[in-house]
Amino acid sequence: MPIVIARDSHTISRANISRNAIRVLTQLQNAGYEAYLVGGGVRDLLLGREPKDFDVATNALPEEVKSVFKNCRLIGRRFRLAHVYFGREIIEVATFRSNRQPEQDGERHAENGMILRDNVYGTVEEDAQRRDLTINALYYDVGDFTVIDFADGMSDLQNGVIRLLGDAESRYREDPVRLLRAIRFAAKLGFIIDPETESPIQSLAPLLSDVPSARLYEEVLKLFLGGSALASFEKLRHYGLFGQLFPATEEALSHEDHDFPITFVNRGLNNTDTRLQQDKSVTPAFLFAVLLWEPVRLGYEAQLTQDLLPAEALQTAANDVLREQIKHVSIPKRFSYPMRDIWQLQPRFEQRQGKRPYRLLSHPRFRAAYDFLLLRAEAGEVELELSKWWTEFQHANSEQKQNMSGQGRRGRGRRRKRRGKNSQSNKPSDE
Ligand code: ATP
Ligand code: MG
């Protein structure tokens, strides 16, 4: 039996729920349907966090939802959903689903236990049971302000526990993305993973290879652009999941560099978290540039020994890494192009004389490439002096700029004068 938590025994207030979500819930209820706020919205409100979005669950069928709202579109095949549009805000409305086998055909699961279609409708109790985590299976009723708890999610929420509903191993097999979701919420909320939920993770990690690369791309963005990138990264590595998503990076990271632990990725992800805290923009292009740089850099160094020009060496290395990478996690072209630019501009930072630094400065991707250079410098991969020079050059007036760049004179010797103290540079220069 579900636990019903009355209005004065929980902390959710309507004032913190999006007006549009309330509108959707009320209109569905007025049309005679059951409708609840569910998922991340309820979870985050109960934790006093600001929800990312508001999901609605109802017993109205997708077509029925569509007939209640003018501003509604049905999407998805494997999982049919209604989207109700209010300007920029979309309220996602899902019909209650069940884990039952469909009556007509038994082909809902693939041989490996993975769910292929998920459109068997059910009751609210059944809907709760097929959700992933207990803390994601709480339902809020805007009509009487109660929270309905079908899976003891409230106590897990209070105790900070990530627990999969049902038998963990079969739930992971049904949908291996749940492996990533368990990690993501543990990282984001700082919760511990219940032992039964935790123990199958490592051994089931290879199941991720069955998940379409486009879906993994979406999950990667949630893992690394949700404000807890560093914690997610560390946990993913701990459970052997990171290597399923980014095998070449995992491989590169497992070889420590001259006894120096490689800190570049950690720093890059930490930087992403900090930017989000400061309400600064983050882009998938920069994120993937960070996540894939270690294998690209190793490939680049190997290519340089083949007597290639730096630009060619880098391009070859980038191609090699990307060709393999997109088999696991896809990257849309609109992000992979700027990502390549960020890499491709790195050797050009070495050239500080004459007109070249001016040209680099006016490159549309200069800012991102410079931020990337700063990370490399902090990680000890290039000299700090180099990144400092570029920081100075950007802010210098035109006379200072001329002095810094030797006014077109090729004073190559000068740039070697000062060496950063902690120079453990393994970045070949391209002179
Ligand atoms: P957030 O939106 O903050 O990332 P969320 O919990 O709302 O977190 P969504 O992806 O928006 O995550 O999903 C909404 C709800 O749908 C979840 O809370 C969960 O109940 C359910 N759900 C999502 N993905 C799965 C899945 N792979 N298996 C089972 N249930 C899921
Ligand atoms: Mg959500």
Image (cartoon, grey):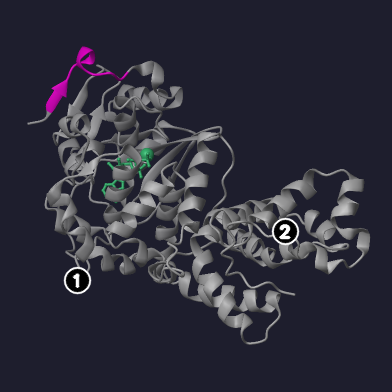
Nearest the camera: 208 or 193? 193
In the displayed structure image, the side of residue 248 where residue 427 appears, left or right:
right
Q: Nearer the viewer, residue 237 or 129?
A: 237
Start-end of magenta stretch? 3-12
Q: What type is the residue that disc 1 sits on? A: Glu
Residue 128 x %, y %: 19, 39
**For this view, does 299 lie left or right of residue 102?**
right
The residue carrying mark 2 is 418
Question: Is 319 on the left or on the right of 141, as rendered?
Answer: right
Name the quadrant where ligand 1 sits: top left
Q: Is residue 7 magenta?
A: yes
Camera-side residue of 115 and 133: 133
The x, y position of residue 231, in whole percent, is: 37, 47
Q: Earlier in the sequence, mark 1 or mark 2?
A: 1
The residue most toward the bottom is: 306
- Residue 47 visible in the picture: yes
In magenta segment, residue 220: no
Q: Specify the farthest residue to the left.
A: 1
Answer few, some or many: residues within 10 Å of disc 1's Cα (few below 14, many 20 plus, some between 14 and 19): few
Q: Is residue 20 shown above or below 219? A: above
Residue bearing the label numbered 1: 111
* Snapshot quadrant of residue 302: bottom right
Residue type, numbered disc 2: Arg
Name the mark nearer the viewer: 1 or 2. Answer: 2
**Mark 1 vs ligand 1: CB below 8 Å:** no
Q: CA distance from mark 1 to mark 2?
A: 63 Å
| Image height of 412 relative to 8, above or below | below
Which residue does the image show at 58% across and 73% down from the upper left?
Answer: 318
Rendered position, 367 above or below 16: below
